[in-house]
Amino acid sequence: MEEIDRAIVAALTGDGRLSYTDLAEKVGLSVSAVHQRVRRLEQRGVIKGYAARVSFEALDLPLTAFVAIRPFDPSQPDDAPERLAHLPEIDSCYSVAGEDFYLLLVRVASPTDLERVLQEIRTSANVTTRTTVVLSTPYEHRPPKVGPDPVNPHRLRGISAESAGSQAG
């Protein structure tokens, strides 16, 4: 991916409501060039969509927990995501390497609600759980790093020597 596309993605990750004019100013392109690049990034699936970031505390869901799950019987079908899809408290489901099979991000109103959801997870998917409660979130949803290639600091990441020469002029 070209460095200018990385800069566009980083800017939109930071603020998905940027106008094309503001985005063009941030990345140093014309408005029409930015519009065209954003459209291509959407078509290629680099930009999958736009969403509001919400305060879960304001939505009365102040308790966040990570729940690692693994089946009681590892030979059972690997269908836990489908079995758990009906639980709205599960924000995200990640397939992971290691002893656990999946890591769930759960958001609930209280410890009592977490206990109820854990029981529903165990029953619905026939799994054991290991829970980590989040105390605070110093940061999340950070934009991707845009900048020099860590291997060759004189070259920008994602830009070949040929395209770097054509972009310099």
Image (cartoon, rainbow, N blue to C red):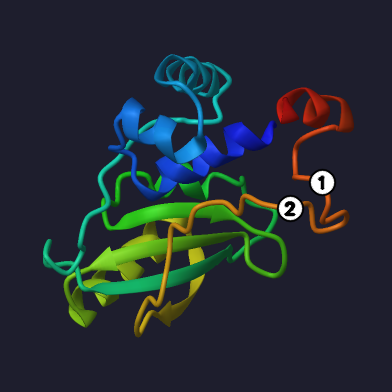
The answer to whether residue 108 is above or below residue 79 is: below
Q: Which mark is residue 166?
A: none
Q: Amino acid at mark 1?
A: Arg
Quadrant of the rendering where the C terminus is positioned: top right
Q: Residue at x 52, y 20 (%)?
A: 37
- 136 or 11: nearer the viewer: 11
- 56 or 46: nearer the viewer: 46
The answer to whether residue 10 is above or below residue 117 is: above
The answer to whether residue 32 is above or below residue 45 is: above
- Asked if residue 49 lies left or right of residue 167, the reply is left
Furthest-front residue in view?
Answer: 169
Question: How many C-alpha atoms fall within 10 Å of the one at disc 1: few (<14), some, or many (≥20)?
Answer: some
Answer with the quarter of the image where residue 50 lies.
top left
Quadrant of the rendering where the N terminus is positioned: top right
Question: How many C-alpha atoms fall within 10 Å of the one at disc 2: few (<14), some, or many (≥20)?
Answer: some
Q: Residue at x 42, y 70 (%)?
A: 139
Q: Which mark is residue 148?
A: 2
How far across and down, in percent of the image, does residue 158 sit? 75, 38
Q: Residue at x 70, y 53 (%)?
A: 75
- What distance separates the C-alpha of mark 2 from that of mark 1? 6 Å
Helix, strand or loop status at disc 1: loop
- Asked if residue 77 lies left or right of residue 15, the reply is right
The earlier-in-sequence mark between 2 and 1 is 2
The answer to whether residue 156 is above or below residue 92 is: above
How far across and down, in percent of the image, does residue 135 sit? 35, 85
How far across and down, in percent of the image, does residue 107 sit? 28, 65
The number of numbered discs placed on residues in the rendered structure image is 2
Marks 2 & 1, CB-CB < 8 Å contact: yes
Q: Provide the residue designation for mark 1.
A: 155
Helix, strand or loop status at disc 2: loop
- Asked if residue 112 lies left or right of residue 157, the reply is left
Q: Amino acid at mark 2?
A: Pro
